[in-house]
Image (tube, rainbow, N blue to C red):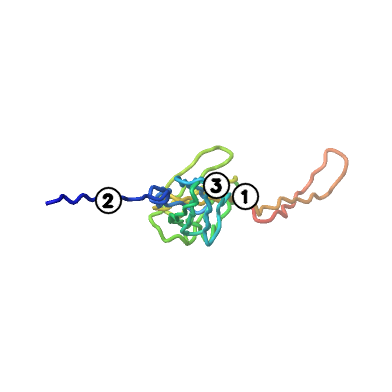
Amino acid sequence: TNPIRAVMLSYATPCDTFTTTITPTDTLCLGESLQLQATGGVQYSWFGAFGGLNDTSIANPIASPPQTTTYICTIKNDSGCVKTEQVKIWVNPLPVADTLIVTNNFCGDSSGIVNVGNISSNTAPYSYTLTNLQTSNNNTQNTNVFSNLGSGIYAIQITDANGCSWADSLTITETNNVVANFTANPQSGVAPLNVAFNNTSLNANV
């Protein structure tokens, strides 16, 4: 009997050994940026339906998406092989307050109040920090009302359960309705002179 010999040949194209990687899925707060990274090619082309890329033709663009976005990267090697990779970037909204209601001080007392309104992000619990920009004193609490505040300029920061923060500034002024006014009778004369003063002040206790 004659043995039968067989030779198996295999051929690998440059595309068979073409491997790529891309940044894994990540989460940002609105307004934050992330550097994306793709590897394995010599040419890169990025696309995202909502934009937010500083350069779509490099391997590692900076992404600042305005909302949750899937970025697609087309990667080409030096043999002309093409692969696509994609990464999803989740964007959490900021805890924006719809109103900041300020009650001003009255006659120099420290009775100012700041009431933070409804927050749009729906990711409670929230942390509230109020900082007096003149003294740098700050107060952090879990309730939305600050009281016993002096006059001044303040910064308010709200942080939600995702770690996203929103900030604004406000001013507490002083209300003083007192109007001091007096009349004299007579208004002039030779000393010694008896003068009668009439108090016509408003909103004051004598």
Asked where in the image residue 52 lies, by quadrant, the reply is bottom right
Whether residue 89 is visible here, answered yes or no, is no
Judge depth for marks 3 and 1 and give the one in front: 3
Q: Earlier in the sequence, mark 3 or mark 1?
A: 3
- Dot 2 falls on a residue whose secondary structure is loop
Judge depth for marks 1 and 2 and give the one in front: 2
Q: Is residue 90 above or below residue 193?
A: below
- Label 1 to label 2: alpha-carbon separation: 93 Å
Crowd around label 1: few <14 · some 14–19 · many ≥20 (10 Å): some
- Label 3 to label 2: alpha-carbon separation: 42 Å
Which residue shows up at 38% across the image and 55% down it? 125
Whether residue 24 is visible here, answered yes or no, is yes
Label number found at residue 8:
2
Circle 1: residue type: Glu
Residue 90 image offset from top left, x and y in percent: 43, 56
- Dot 1 falls on a residue whose secondary structure is strand
- Dot 3 falls on a residue whose secondary structure is loop
Circle 2: residue type: Met
Residue placed under numbered mark 1 in the picture:
174
The answer to the question of whether label 3 and label 1 lie on touching residues, with beta carbons closer than 8 A, is: no
Q: Earlier in the sequence, mark 3 or mark 2?
A: 2
- Label 3 to label 1: alpha-carbon separation: 56 Å
Q: Earlier in the sequence, mark 1 or mark 2?
A: 2
Which residue shows up at 83% across the image and 38% down it? 192
Circle 3: residue type: Ile
Residue placed under numbered mark 3 in the picture:
58
